[in-house]
């Protein structure tokens, strides 16, 4: 067994299953001895070398390529070995077992990236972007994750932190010299600086919210009376016959789900049972599930029949819809009503007039869903944010707003600015709790 001053970890870095190539990754301290015992050679730094991977008795496990990246010039900041062999699962397991024999241990999920973070090769946002890049479900999400991995989001946060530090210095200078007749805050434009800071922070928060939707998707629930065209609209958006469409009321008994993309934004469309009073036991269960889906929605599309407009039954549904959820009235079957597709506002609520059957007006719906997602006006500058990023940005926005209101109470203002800085610093990991790291990296795949 080869000893090392740094705990060495190993894992299969390629996906489970058979492939032409498989990779085992090892990270730790002074891996030259492990590499020598495994390959019979001393690999040159950053050179691909063809060699045999040897078992303990000297027999070849596989023949492949070894790459050696000495510390600190590696992904983790430690010595790193990459063993590229044939991608059969048995071969990979034999190669991993040999690395364990030589003193490494099986890596925990995300441990390679965690070591890169702890060794200052990545900040916390960049580390999370590694997982976001792997899990990206659209080309737009890939591009956003790459920008975060390159440090774009981190630099924006750090710039805001730097501006907060300057503001704190100005405010606390006033605390240190209360008898000074010079109004430090006025002379240094501290108020204006704080207002500009808040505007830029709000802009970043808006882009981060749009990016969060880009990552997790927007949950859209189709709701309304039976036979208003919910299933037809689902099929139109999905581009295929996903839901059964008949003239019989109550055809949809359970939620039907379909995920589509509009401009790279994942939309989880959920068709629900028609909402009405019924004695049918099975239909009642479907209606109860429909209301449960509505409670969890990001946006509810309440479908109406354009020929009749909003009926008392439709109004009863609208009144019951949760107030904290975006609600859009969709007047379907405009072709049968002899009306043109349109978008208008009525009683403070957006109405869309369209035909799920012909497709007329579907463009209005797509644009409206992008607006709800926060994508409109952002395009490619969104930040692929996680829930903790949004929480930290929201706290910083709240604390800086309180600070602006308490400029006359310097001590309180200074404390709010400190709390805002602390919240922003959590994003990149400059201020963190150890349990936060465990939670973040435990969600990574093994080998990253």
Image (spheres, grey):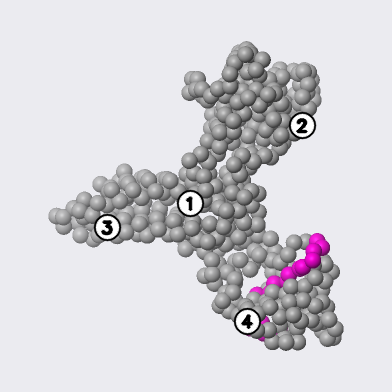
Query: Would residue 399 be visible to someone looking at this image?
Result: no
Closer to the camera in the image, 270 or 232: 232
Q: Residue drawn at (77%, 76%), measured in percent from left and top?
A: 64
Magenta residues? 17-34
Q: Residue drawn at (59%, 71%), measured in percent from left and top?
A: 75
Viewport quadrant of the N terminus: bottom right
Counting from the top left corner in percent of width and height, residue 213 is at 57, 44
Q: Residue drawn at (21%, 51%), measured in percent from left and top?
A: 186
Disc 4: which residue? 45
Viewport quadrant of the C terminus: bottom right
First-in-chain label (1 vs 2): 2
Disc 3: which residue? 170
Foreground: disc 1 or disc 2: 2
Secondary structure at badge 1 equals helix
First-in-chain label (4 vs 1): 4
As drawn, the label of residue 392 is 1
Question: Is 363 above or below relative to 119?
Answer: above
Disc 2: which residue? 241
Query: Would residue 123 be visible to someone looking at this image?
Result: yes
């Amino acid at each position: 067994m080869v000893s090392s001053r740094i705990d060495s970890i190993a894992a299969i870095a390629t996906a489970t299953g058979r492939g032409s190539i498989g990779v085992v990754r090892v990270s730790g301290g002074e891996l030259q001895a492990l590499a020598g015992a495994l390959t019979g050679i001393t690999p040159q730094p950053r050179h691909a070398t063809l060699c045999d991977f040897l078992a303990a008795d000297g027999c070849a496990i596989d023949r492949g390529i070894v790459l050696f990246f000495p510390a600190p010039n590696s992904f983790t900041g430690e010595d790193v070995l990459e063993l590229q062999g044939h991608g059969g699962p048995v071969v990979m397991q034999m190669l991993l077992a040999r690395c364990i024999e030589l003193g490494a241990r099986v890596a925990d999920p995300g441990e390679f990236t965690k070591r890169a973070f702890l060794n200052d090769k990545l900040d916390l946002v960049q580390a999370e972007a590694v997982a976001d890049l792997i899990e990206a479900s659209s080309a737009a999400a890939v591009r956003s994750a790459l920008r975060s991995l390159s440090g774009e989001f981190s630099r924006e946060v750090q710039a805001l932190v730097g501006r907060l530090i300057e503001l704190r210095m100005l405010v606390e200078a006033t605390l240190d010299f209360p008898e000074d007749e010079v109004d430090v805050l006025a002379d240094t434009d501290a108020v204006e600086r704080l207002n500009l800071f808040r505007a830029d922070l709000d802009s970043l928060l808006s882009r981060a919210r749009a990016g969060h939707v880009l990552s997790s998707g927007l949950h859209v629930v189709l709701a309304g009376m039976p036979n208003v065209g919910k299933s037809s609209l689902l099929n139109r958006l999905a581009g295929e016959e996903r839901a059964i469409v008949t003239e019989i009321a109550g055809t949809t008994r359970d939620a039907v789900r379909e995920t589509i993309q509009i401009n790279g934004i994942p939309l989880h469309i959920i068709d629900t049972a028609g909402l009405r009073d019924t004695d049918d036991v099975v239909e009642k269960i479907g209606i109860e599930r429909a209301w449960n889906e509505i409670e969890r929605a990001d946006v509810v599309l309440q479908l109406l029949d354009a020929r009749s407009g909003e009926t008392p039954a439709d109004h009863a549904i609208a009144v019951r819809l949760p107030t904290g959820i975006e609600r859009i009235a969709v007047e379907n079957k405009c072709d049968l009503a002899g009306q043109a597709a349109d978008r208008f506002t009525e009683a403070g609520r957006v109405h869309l007039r369209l035909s799920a059957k012909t497709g007329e007006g579907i463009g209005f719906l797509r644009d409206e869903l992008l607006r709800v997602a926060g994508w409109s006006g952002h395009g490619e500058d969104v930040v692929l944010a996680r829930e903790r990023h949004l929480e930290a940005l929201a706290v910083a926005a709240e604390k800086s707003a309180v600070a602006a209101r308490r400029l006359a109470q310097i001590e309180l203002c200074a404390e709010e600015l400190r709390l805002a800085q602390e919240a922003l610093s959590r994003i990149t990991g400059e201020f963190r709790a150890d349990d936060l790291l465990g939670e973040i990296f435990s969600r990574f795949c093994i080998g990253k």
